[in-house]
């Protein structure tokens, strides 16, 4: 039986662990060839991610690049195209969080968070978009957060960046639709990854989640797969938020 992403080439940023790795594995399981990006990943993480993807029998390339650096992004895309010829699917997943109250945050905290989480998505879309426009084909999935919809104390740079991703998604969806390029967004709720705070792992906190559990990276990967795949061929500019009912 044909897999939904057979013969597709996908780039996943922030792919060595957590949601990014789960997304890469899911896309590979559906037949995609993968370009895995991360910046200064631990060698054990990136090797495990590479092996997990390669297990599905399709090509895989790992590229260390800071998505907030224009030259690094352009070199990453050039390397991917040199290896595989094109990029059909982009999953903009790379992100960081620097918690702190507004009066204790530094400008460097703010700038670095916005640079990686928002500027990084802009730079990667810009670098990938030219080829997609030329082929009149492509699917872009930007990863935001439910905190971009509702906010949270002591995470203002993160929340602002993720709200920006949602706005960027809607704008790009309108801009790129004439080229048959779809742009959507997944805004995960509290998911069991390294970025989750200790306070969000307590029994009391989990009791506030209507579905009574944290999300898993695989939960988010399923949402990303749907938006990347032909199953959502008439869907663009949408925000899909798998969040256990935290946002209703």
Image: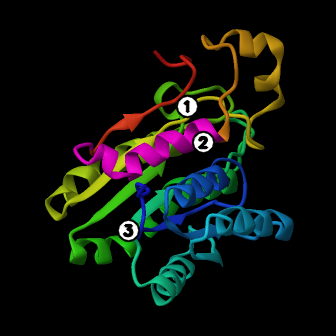
Depth check: give the residue in front, 112 or 88. 88
Q: Which residue is mark 3?
A: 88
- Left or right: residue 8 versus residue 180 is right
- Give the overall secondary structure of the magenta segment: helix
Compared with residue 61, is residue 6 higher up or lower down, i.e. above or below?
Answer: above
Quadrant the N terminus occupies: bottom left
Q: Secondary structure at mark 3?
A: loop
- Left or right: residue 202 versus residue 190 is right
Compared with residue 219, is residue 134 higher up or lower down, i.e. above or below?
Answer: below
x and y, in percent, of residue 198 in the image: 83, 29
Indicate yes or no whether the magenta region holds residue 150: no
Q: Which residue is mark 2?
A: 158
x and y, in percent, of residue 117 in the image: 55, 53
Q: Is residue 41 visible?
A: no
Count of marks placed on residues: 3
Q: Residue at x 53, y 31 (%)?
A: 146
Q: Residue at x 60, y 10 (%)?
A: 210
Q: CA distance from mark 3 to mark 2?
A: 28 Å
x and y, in percent, of residue 244 in the image: 57, 21
Which residue ends up furthest to the front in the rendered image?
A: 1
Which residue ends up furthest to the bottom in the rendered image?
A: 82
Magenta range is 218-235
Q: Secondary structure at mark 2?
A: helix
Callout 3: few (<14), some (14-19), or many (20+) C-alpha neighbours within 10 Å? many
Q: Residue at x 72, y 9 (%)?
A: 207
Q: CA distance from mark 3 to mark 1?
A: 29 Å
- Left or right: residue 141 versus residue 17 is left
Q: Are marks 1 and 2 in contact (CB under 8 Å)?
A: yes
Which residue ends up furthest to the left in the rendered image?
A: 178
């Amino acid at each position: 039986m044909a897999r939904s992403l057979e013969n597709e080439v996908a780039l996943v940023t922030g792919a060595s662990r957590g949601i990014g790795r789960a997304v890469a594995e899911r896309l590979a399981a559906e037949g995609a060839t993968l370009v895995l990006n991360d910046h200064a990943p631990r060698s054990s993480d990136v090797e495990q991610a590479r092996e997990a993807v390669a297990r599905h029998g399709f090509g895989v390339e790992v590229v260390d690049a800071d998505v907030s650096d224009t030259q690094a992004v352009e070199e990453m895309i050039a390397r991917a195209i040199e290896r595989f010829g094109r990029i059909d699917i982009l999953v903009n997943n790379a992100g960081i969080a620097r918690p702190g109250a507004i009066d204790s945050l530094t400008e460097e905290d703010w700038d670095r968070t916005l640079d990686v989480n928002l500027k990084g998505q802009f730079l990667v879309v810009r670098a990938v978009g030219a080829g997609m426009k030329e082929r009149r084909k492509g699917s872009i999935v930007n990863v935001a957060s439910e905190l971009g919809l509702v906010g949270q104390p002591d995470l203002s740079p993160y929340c602002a960046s993720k709200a920006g991703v949602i706005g960027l998604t809607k704008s790009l969806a309108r801009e790129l639709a004439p080229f048959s390029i779809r742009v959507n967004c997944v805004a995960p709720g509290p998911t069991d990854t390294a970025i989750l705070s200790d306070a969000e792992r307590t029994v009391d906190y989990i009791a506030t989640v209507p579905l009574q559990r944290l999300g898993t990276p695989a939960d988010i990967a399923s949402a990303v797969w749907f938006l990347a795949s032909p199953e959502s061929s008439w869907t663009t500019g949408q925000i899909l938020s798998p969040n256990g009912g935290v946002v209703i």
